[in-house]
Structure formats: structure tokens, C-alpha cells
Image (tube, grey):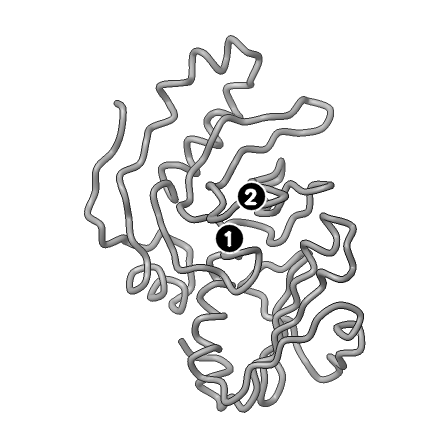
């Protein structure tokens, strides 16, 4: 099978929260996706384990062809989600592309050995424990941006001065390098991926969504 055609209106993959499901189905577009199983024999001949091909194929079946609105950082994130040829070794682990960049970038987006979604920059830097966390973070940014009275961007070393006392980490985004924090009237998104992956502290950035009511903090 060369490709899979589908309705341009996506059905959100299972296991996403309500906010993320609505975000995908209202704001996403599903485009025809290519099956990667046609490469299976060739990839195995090049030493790629069948289990890694299966992992990439499962990602493609669940997420391939899904185009979501741009993320507020990482120059918008992948334009269209889709798996590619796995790369790696038994010693270092295997990863595969998660989708092409929207613009020319110094790194790409990948799914790592343990399923984390991250950037392949100066070093591999996992952003979220899974692709679900990335999509949840997009949905939360969209929701917070619409509900907040103020949105403040803080960059570089000033981010380290943020006081998170009294805030709780938002679990559904599965944060690793990137995290979200919920306070009494605000949400804070911390984007550490570029600072870590590019060894560039100046790239550290936080977005503070202020003036949120209960719906703004928890709804969506």
C-alpha cells in the first residue's frame, strides 16, 4: 500500500485528554499519509531491527498525516506528524523522525528509544515523555492563550528567577525538559529544550499566562 487516504477531519487518537481531543478534532487536519511498511524489507536488510520498524509503523498508523497549528516555540514544531526511517544502534538505542520542520532548523523532531518526543540538536533532548504529552501541551497553550488576560514572555537568565512556589506541575503534558505549571491564577510554560539541546542558555524561555479563572486553569 503506497498511501492511506482519509477524511481531512481527524479523529483524535485514543488516550488523549478531553482538551487535547477537542484541540485535535477542531484545529487539526488529516492529510493522506504514506505507509512505511513498504520499506520494511529494505530497512531490515540495512540492519534495522524489526521491532523498531514496528514501533515506527505504530506511530505512523496513529499519528501519521496529522497537521496541527504551530506551537508557540520551536518555530512551531513539526508541520505534519509522520514517522521516518529508524536510526541508531543496540548500544545507543533507536529513534525515528516524528515529522518535518516547518522552517529550516538546527535540529529535527524525533521519537526516542523510550518513546519520548524531543529534538535532535547538539544532543538528544527529550521534551515530553511521549507524543501525547506534546499534543497535550499544544492544546494547553491554545486554551491558555485564549483565556488569559495577559501573556508574558520571559527569556534567558531571567527565567531562572521565576518563583514556582505554590505552583503544581501539570501532569498531562508529561514534561521532561519542557514543563507546565499551574498556580492560583496563572499557568506557566517552561521551554528548556533549545537551551539544553543546543547548549545555549540564552534560548531558555517561559510563557506566563495570567489572569486565569477556574475554567482557564483547568478547563478546555
Q: Which mark is residue 163?
A: none
Q: x, y (%) of residue 168?
A: 66, 76
Tell me the number on the disc at residue 109. Answer: 2
Judged from the image, the secondary structure of the residue bearing numbered disc 1 is: loop
Q: Secondary structure at mark 2?
A: strand
Mark 1 or mark 2: name the one nearer the start of the chain: 1
Q: Quadrant of residue 21?
A: bottom left
Packing grade of label 1 (10 A; few <14, some 14-19, many >=20) is many
Give the numbered dot on residue 77.
1
User: In the image, what residue occupies the spot 37% across and 22% down?
Assistant: 37
Q: Is residue 103 above or below residue 157?
A: above
- Answer whether labels 1 and 2 touch (C-beta < 8 Å): yes
Residue at image coords 39%, 36%: 60
On-image quarter of the N terminus: top left
Indicate the position of residue 81 as horizontal and vertical percent values: 42, 44
Picture quarter with the C terminus:
bottom left
Along the line of sight, which residue is nearer the eye, 177 or 167?
177
Q: Residues within 10 Å of mark 2 (few under 14, many from 20)?
A: many
Q: CA distance from mark 1 to mark 2?
A: 8 Å
Tell me the quarter of the picture where residue 12 sits.
Answer: bottom left
Identify which residue is drawn at 29% across, 64% down.
26
Task: Give coordinates of residue 91: x percent, y percent.
Answer: 73, 24
Task: Tell me which residue sits at (59%, 33%) in the image.
Answer: 95
Q: Nearer the viewer, residue 167 or 147?
A: 147
Q: How many marks on residues?
A: 2
Vertical placement of residue 51 versus 186, above or below: above
Q: Residue furthest top?
A: 45
- Indicate the position of residue 144 as horizontal and vertical percent values: 48, 77
Amino acid at each position: 500500500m503506497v498511501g492511506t487516504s482519509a477524511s481531512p477531519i481527524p479523529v483524535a487518537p485514543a488516550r488523549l485528554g478531553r482538551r487535547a481531543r477537542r484541540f485535535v478534532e477542531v484545529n487539526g487536519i488529516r492529510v493522506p499519509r504514506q505507509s512505511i511498511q513498504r520499506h520494511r524489507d529494505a530497512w531490515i536488510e540495512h540492519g534495522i531491527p524489526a521491532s523498531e520498524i514496528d514501533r515506527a509503523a505504530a506511530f505512523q498508523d496513529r499519528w501519521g498525516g496529522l497537521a496541527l497549528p504551530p506551537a508557540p516555540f520551536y518555530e512551531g514544531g513539526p508541520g505534519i506528524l509522520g514517522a521516518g526511517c529508524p536510526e541508531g544502534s543496540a548500544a545507543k538505542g533507536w529513534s525515528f523522525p516524528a515529522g518535518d520542520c516547518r522552517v529550516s532548523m538546527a535540529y529535527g523532531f524525533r521519537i526516542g528509544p523510550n518513546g519520548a518526543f524531543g529534538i535532535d540538536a547538539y544532543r538528544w533532548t527529550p521534551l515530553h515523555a511521549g507524543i501525547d504529552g506534546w499534543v497535550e501541551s499544544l492544546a494547553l497553550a491554545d486554551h491558555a492563550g485564549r483565556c488569559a488576560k495577559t501573556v508574558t514572555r520571559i527569556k534567558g537568565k531571567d527565567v531562572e528567577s521565576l518563583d514556582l512556589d505554590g505552583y503544581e506541575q501539570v501532569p498531562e503534558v508529561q514534561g521532561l525538559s519542557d514543563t507546565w505549571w499551574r498556580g492560583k491564577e496563572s499557568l506557566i510554560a517552561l521551554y528548556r529544550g533549545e537551551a539544553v539541546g543546543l547548549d545555549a542558555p540564552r534560548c531558555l524561555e517561559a510563557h506566563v499566562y495570567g489572569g486565569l479563572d477556574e475554567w482557564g486553569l483547568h478547563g478546555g
